[in-house]
Amino acid sequence: MPTTTSHELSIAYRTNSPQLRFGVNDLVDILERRATVIQTNLGDLSGNDSPSIVFLGNSADRDQLAELTDETLIPSSHDPEGYTISRVRVGDESTLLVSAADDTGGMYGALDLCEQLRAGTKIEEIQEKTATPSVEFRALKFNLPWSPYRDGEQTEIHFETCRDLEFWRAFLDMMARNRFNALTLWNLHPFPYMIKPHAYPEASPFTDEELERWQNFWHELFRMAANRGVETYIVNWNIHTTPEFAEAHGVHQYNDPADKIKEYTRACVTEVLNEYPKLTGLGTSVASWTENMTPEAKHTWLQETFVEGIKRADREIKLLHRSIKSQALDEMRRVIEAEAALDNVSEVLVPSKFNWSHGHSTTKLALTHDHKSGDVDNLLWNPPPDDYSVVWTVRNEDFFVLRWGDPDFIRDHIQANHASKSYVGGYIIGSEGYIPAKDLSHRVHEHQTWQYAFEKQWLFYLLWGRLLYDPSTPDEVFEQAFETRYGPGLGERMLDGFRLGSQMPEELAAFHAGTWDYTLYPEGFLAPIENMGLDDGVSPFISINELIDHQTLDPDYLSIPTYLERVLDGQAIEDHLVTPLDVADRMTDTGESALALADSLKQERPDDVGAFECELCDIRTWGHLSLYFAEKLRAGVEFETYRMTGMNRWKTAVVHLETAADHWDEICAITSDHYQPLPYATDHWPGQTFAWDHYRDQVQRDIQIARNTRPYDYEIP
C-alpha cells in the first residue's frame, strides 16, 4: 500500500465481498470530496501499512488483521448483521475499525460512517459504537404487475418499469441503505414466468427465447439482492395453474385440487428452487382460491404440493407460511411441523396481518386475517411455537399519494408487538393496491425530482427500515436526512411536520374500523366497501352518517353513539378510553401545528421549488385533512345528540361541517395544482380514479344531511 499523505485516506477490506464493496463505494463517494481515497484488499496488507479505515466481515478477516495489531483490541463477537466501530493501532497510525460477524453487518457499518460524515463529523471524530439489529427479519412486500392479485390500469402501467433491472437496482440500493434485509415478491402464479416444468412443458405460455429472457431477469435480480444483504422470496396464492395447462388437461385454472394440478404444483416448487440458487425461499398460503375445501383438506393439499416439492429440491431454503384464512390454526401448525422437520428447510416464518389490511392504525392488535371474521386467534402463538416465528405484516392501503412519516408510531409498534413478544421474529411492510414503481400520482411539474414512486416516499422507507433495525435510532438521524436533501436548519421542523400530519390516517383508521383492502382509504376519507357499519350506498366517501354509525378498531376508542349513550346515561368515561371529542382535539392540535410548521418553512424558503415545496404541500394537505376530520367528528357528536335527544344542536353541527368544507376546499386547492387523478384499484369500483376534488359534492352533501335530518322519535305531522 502506498504511504498516505494528509490529503489521502486508505481503506482496507476484502474486496471480493459484494456487500462490503457496496458500503465502501458509498463511503468513497463521500470521502473523495475531502481527500484522495486508496482502496486495498485486506489480504494484501503488510506490517508496514497503516490504513485509515479497515472493514472486517468475518472471522478470517479478523485473523488477518490480528497479525498486524493487538488482537485483544479487535471486537471478537457480534450478532448477525451487527457491527462495532472502534479504533485500533495498525502500524504506526490509529485506524478506524469496522468489525462485524458477517459482510452485511460490515456493509451497515460502512453506511453508518457515511451517515456520520454527511452530518459534518470529521473522520477523526467518528463516534465509536456497537449496533445490533432489534428485529431480525425486516422485509418489504412488493406486488408484481404480472399475474397480479389486483389487476387493472393501476397495475398494468407498472409492467415495463418492473421488468427493468435498473429500477430494481435503485430499489435494492434503497433497501440496503435503510437496513431492510428481505424482499418478498408477490403474484398469483409466479412459476410459469420462472421455469418450464420438465414434465409439463405444455403449461408454459412462453417460447424458449421468451422464457430465457425472463430467467435472465430473475437470476440477475436475485444476484443483485444477495449482493446487498437482501434475501428474496417468491410468494404465491393457491390454487392456480396456467390457462394453457388447464386447457391441456381439462381442469380449472383456479380453485381446483385435482391430482394433476397437485403434481404440476409440486414439480414447479422443486424446479424453481433448483433453477435459482440465489432465491432464498418461497412463501405460500391456503387462500384465496381454496374456498370450497375444509381446513384439513386445504392444509393437506399444501403438504402434498409445497412441502413435498421443497423436500425434493436439492438445496436448503427458508419458508414463509402465511396464516391468512387458514381458519383452523391447529391444522396449520400441523403442516408447519412437517415443513420445519425437513432437512432442507432452515427456517419457517409465519406472516400474519396486523389489523388486517390497515396496519397504520392502532398499535394494538385488534384484527388478523386467519378467519374471514378477522377475529384474533391467538392459537398462532399460544402455546409459543418452537418451530416457527410469527412475522407481522403491516399493510398500507391507507396512503398512496401523500408522503407519510411518523417515527413514534413505528417505535411504539415495535415496543408493543415485538420487544415483549418472544414469538415474533420480524415484520413485512407493504401494500396490495399500490406498487411503488412508476409514479402515477404526480403531474409533470417542477416538483418532480424523483424517478420512481418509492423515491418520492423515501421517508416511509427510511423510518420503517432504520427503526426496525434499531428502534432507538434518534430523530436527529431523520432530521439530518432532510437537511442532506434540502439544506441546513429545517430537518427538525420537516420531520415534526410529517410526524404530526401523518397521525391523521392513523387516527381515522383507529376510529373508523376497516378490514380488507378497500374497506378504508383514510388519505381520501373513503370507505369504498363499508363492512363494519352503515353503507348509505351513495359514494365511497365517508358521509357524516357513515362516520357516526360505524365500529371503532382500537378497543379503547368510543364510537359516537357509544360515547353519547354513556354521556346521556350519566356514566363515567374511564381514563383509558378515547372519546370522539378527544380524537377531534388531538386532530386540531396536530393539524394546526403541522400547518404552522409548513408556513414557517415556506416563509424562510419562499423561492425554493422542486421536491422541497412538494413535501411542504403534503404537510399542508395532512394538516387540513386533520382539521377536516376534527370538525366532522365534532359535527357528528352534535348531530347525533340532536337525533337522540331532540336538543337543538343541529345548527352547531352545520357550522362544524361548513368549517370542515372550508378545509376540504384548501385540500383540493393544494393537491389539484400538482397531483393528478390516481387509478384506484378495486374490483368493486372499476375504472375509477381518486382525487380529493372528486368529492366536493359529497362534502356539501353532509351539510344538507345535517340541515334536513330530524330526531329519531320525530313524527311527521
Image (cartoon, rainbow, N blue to C red):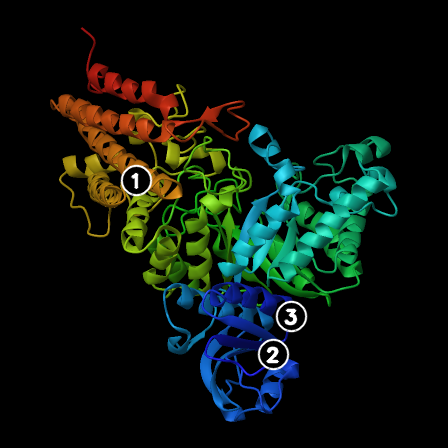
Q: Mark 1 or mark 2, which is nearer to you?
A: 1
Task: Give the secondary structure at mark 1.
Answer: loop
Task: Assess whether mark 2 and mark 1 are in contact (beta carbons under 8 angstroms).
Answer: no
What residue sits right under mark 2 in the picture?
58
Q: Residue at x 75, y 56 (%)?
A: 276
Secondary element under disc 3, as helix, strand or loop, is: loop
Numbered disc in front, either 2 or 3: 3
Marks 1 and 2, the one that precedes in the sequence: 2
Residue type highlighted by circle 1: Asp
371 or 97: which is nearer to us? 97
Q: Is the residue marked by circle 2 packed among few (<14), some (14-19), or many (20+) residues within 10 Å?
A: some
Query: In the image, which is nearer the foreground, mark 1 or mark 3?
Result: 1
Mark 1 to mark 2 CA distance (whole Å): 50 Å
Task: Categorize mark 3 by other alpha carbons within 10 Å: few (<14), some (14-19), many (20+).
Answer: some
Work out which residue is located at the far top of the displayed protein and give it. 717
Q: Quadrant of the N terminus?
A: bottom right
Q: Which residue has dot 3 on it?
A: 17
Left or right of 319 in this view: 688: left
Tag 2: residue type? Answer: Asn
Disc sitting over residue 607 in the figure: 1
Position of residue 560 measured from the top left corner of the image (x, y, whole percent)? 25, 34
Residue 145 can be seen, yes or no: no
596 relative position to 481: left or right: left
Query: How far apart are the alpha carbons under marks 1 and 3?
Result: 45 Å
For this rendering, which residue is in front, 558 or 582? 582
Residue 541 lies, in percent from the top left, at: 37, 26
Q: CA distance from mark 2 to mark 3?
A: 11 Å
- Judge whether 169 appears above or below 124 on screen: above
Q: Position of residue 240 (x, y in %)?
A: 71, 39
Q: Earlier in the sequence, mark 2 or mark 3?
A: 3
